[in-house]
Amino acid sequence: MPRERGQKVVATNRKARHDFHVIDVYEAGMVLSGTEVKALRQGRASLVDGYATIEGGEAWLENVHIPEYYQGTWNNHSTRRRRKMLLNRDEINKLAREIKESGLTIVPLSIYFKDGRAKVEIALARGKREYDKRQTLKEQQDKREADRAMSTKGKDW
């Protein structure tokens, strides 16, 4: 059987970019059980309440919902268990230092398969305040209106 090629996105956390200022983005592998991989291949996962922690020199992905595999048996996985992330030692140390010193947090942005292996894209981020969210929405709306005006200006009606 040939190996999978390319990238297939399973789940994205669109709310993360709305609620946080993304400072730095990392790609990490995940330690998963067999039924978790099968559930992800069906495209079922939710990152909405997910976050990551660093404990004992290891990175952990917490509160990410991967539903049970419907054809699984008694050894099916629990839906919101802690999952170990696979990062380089330097990356783990840098993330731990940034979290401790700066008050930043680690949020998952997406889960995807890259060449057949499950990966999670995590971001070192700072939480936005309410006025920041409003300002971002206003900038997006202004950009959309400007693009719309530019696209209709060249057309002769």
Image (cartoon, rainbow, N blue to C red):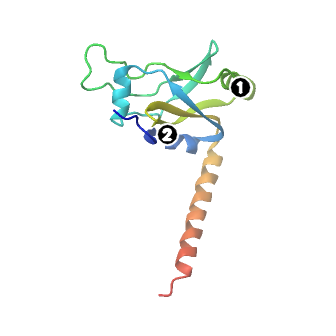
Q: Alpha-carbon neighbours of circle 2 within 10 Å: few (<14), some, or many (≥20)?
A: some
Outermost residue on the right side: it is 101
Residue appearing at x 47%, y 34% in the figure? 47
- Residue 20 % position (x, y): 61, 40
Residue 140's disc number: none
- Residue 155 % position (x, y): 51, 83
Residue appearing at x 52%, y 78% in the figure? 152
Residue marked by disc 1: 94
Height in image: 120 above or below 145?
above
Outermost residue on the front side: it is 1
Q: What residue type is labelled 2?
A: Asn
Question: Between 114 and 42, which is closer to the camera in this rendering?
Answer: 114
Q: Which amino acid does label 1 sit on?
A: Lys
Residue marked by disc 2: 13
- Label 1 SS: helix
> Which image quarter: residue 68?
top left
- Residue 23 % position (x, y): 68, 39
Residue appearing at x 46%, y 30% in the figure? 118
Residue appearing at x 60%, y 63% in the figure? 143
